[in-house]
Image: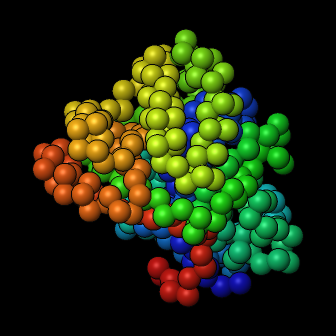
């Protein structure tokens, strides 16, 4: 096939993945549950150089051509796909995010999912790579664990599994199951100094890790039931607690990871104030970064946006509905 362009939504994890049981295959310490986002996404165009004119992969991200060091992780993932297909072709890749990358909005999730689907689709079925979303989920997991979840729309579970074949994402509920919104509040667009990939490695040094992991089976069950019932008041307290527990693990790792900024704390206090004093059902969660995700239902979005406009630390707001899995596009980036 010629050029292939894919758009994939990021996802927000309600129960987080932090720490790996087997780094070689990105086998997580626990299962996780997320919502795929419609309005925070990555678009990737890929073309395999079948004629052999490229000496190396040519990768452009958000308008910047990546040098060898910056492209290492992406090239390593393309190497995996080349290995599966038995080819040596280089690739030309251009990718665009519509949100800040490497700042706690899961750009690696949408990025690696889009790259995987584009690369495998562009090879075509004759190369023997299945385009089944479950198989693609397993391939994406090798590049970024959270990317496995973006291969399905709506509400998704990444099952921990025990090996490369069964540590995959599965759909729980479709996009139209619940009109739940994620208001992504950007307090910093800066790229974080320590990547999630490195953070997963040092999670094992935290004395709080075992306690968090032990409590997750009950939390996972509670979250899945709350989504099934469309019950935000049941979902909210659990996702807040898990986000705080994950960041407690980060803060007590060696070396310590402190992703929060002053604006992060301003948001956490504001959300509790709006809920307790104004009666607005809104709950927070935070991925590996300073930015805060506010979960609410459609009827409360406008009231929350009005209040966010009064906070000095808010740089940008992205309002997202539940979104679909990867979509093939006809319009290419190059």
What residue is rendered at 19% in x and 51% in y?
Answer: 307
Coordinates of residue 123 in the picture (x, y in percent): 74, 75
In which quadrant will I find the N terminus?
A: bottom right
Side of 92 relative to 119 (left or right): left
What residue is rendered at 75% in x and 50% in y?
Answer: 168
Residue sticking out furthest to the bottom: 330
Coordinates of residue 294 in the picture (x, y in percent): 37, 48
Side of 224 relative to 185 (left or right): right
Closer to the camera, 228 or 55? 228
Q: Quadrant of residue 36?
A: bottom right
Residue sticking out furthest to the top: 207
What residue is rendered at 36% in x and 32% in y?
Answer: 259
Considering only vertical position in the picture, is 120 above or below 213? below
Considering only vertical position in the picture, is 199 above or below 106? above
Q: How is the image coloured?
A: rainbow
Number of callouts: 0
Q: Is residue 105 visible?
A: yes
Closer to the camera, 248 or 189? 248
Coordinates of residue 190 in the picture (x, y in percent): 30, 46
Considering only vertical position in the picture, is 230 above or below 283? below
Considering only vertical position in the picture, is 203 above or below 322? above
Q: Quadrant of residue 247?
A: top left
What residue is rendered at 34% in x and 39% in y?
Answer: 290
Q: Is residue 190 visible?
A: no
Closer to the camera, 27 or 191? 27
Closer to the camera, 54 or 155? 155
Coordinates of residue 184 in the picture (x, y in percent): 35, 53
């Amino acid at each position: 096939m010629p050029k292939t362009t894919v758009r994939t939504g990021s996802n927000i994890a309600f129960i987080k993945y932090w720490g790996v049981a087997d780094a070689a295959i990105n086998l997580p310490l626990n299962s996780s549950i997320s919502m795929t986002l419609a309005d925070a996404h990555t678009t990737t165009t890929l073309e395999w150089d079948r004629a052999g004119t490229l000496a190396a992969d040519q990768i452009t991200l958000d308008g910047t051509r990546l040098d060898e060091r910056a492209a290492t992780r992406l090239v390593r993932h393309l190497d995996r796909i080349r290995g599966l297909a038995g080819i040596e072709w280089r690739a030309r890749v251009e990718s665009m995010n519509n949100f800040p990358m490497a700042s706690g909005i899961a750009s690696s999730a949408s990025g690696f999912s889009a790259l995987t689907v584009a690369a495998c689709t562009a090879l075509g079925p004759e190369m023997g790579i299945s385009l089944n979303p479950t198989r693609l989920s397993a391939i994406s997991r090798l590049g970024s664990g959270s990317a496995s979840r973006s291969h399905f729309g709506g509400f998704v579970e990444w099952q921990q599994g025990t090996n490369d074949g069964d540590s995959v994402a599965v759909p729980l509920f479709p996009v139209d199951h619940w009109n739940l919104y994620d208001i992504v509040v950007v307090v910093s667009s800066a790229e974080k100094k320590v990547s999630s990939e490195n953070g997963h490695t040092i999670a094992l040094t935290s004395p709080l890790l075992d306690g968090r992991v032990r409590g997750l089976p009950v939390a996972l069950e509670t979250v899945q039931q709350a989504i099934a019932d469309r019950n935000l008041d049941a979902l909210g307290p659990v996702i807040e607690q898990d986000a705080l527990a994950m960041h407690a693990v980060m803060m007590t790792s060696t070396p310590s990871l402190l992703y929060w900024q002053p604006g992060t704390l301003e948001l956490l206090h504001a959300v509790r104030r709006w809920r307790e004093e104004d009666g607005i059902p809104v709950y927070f969660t935070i991925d590996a970064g300073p930015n805060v995700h506010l979960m609410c239902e459609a009827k409360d979005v406008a009231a929350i946006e009005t209040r966010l406009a009064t906070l000095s630390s808010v740089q940008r707001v992205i309002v997202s509905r539940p979104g679909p899995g990867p979509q093939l596009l006809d319009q290419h980036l190059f």
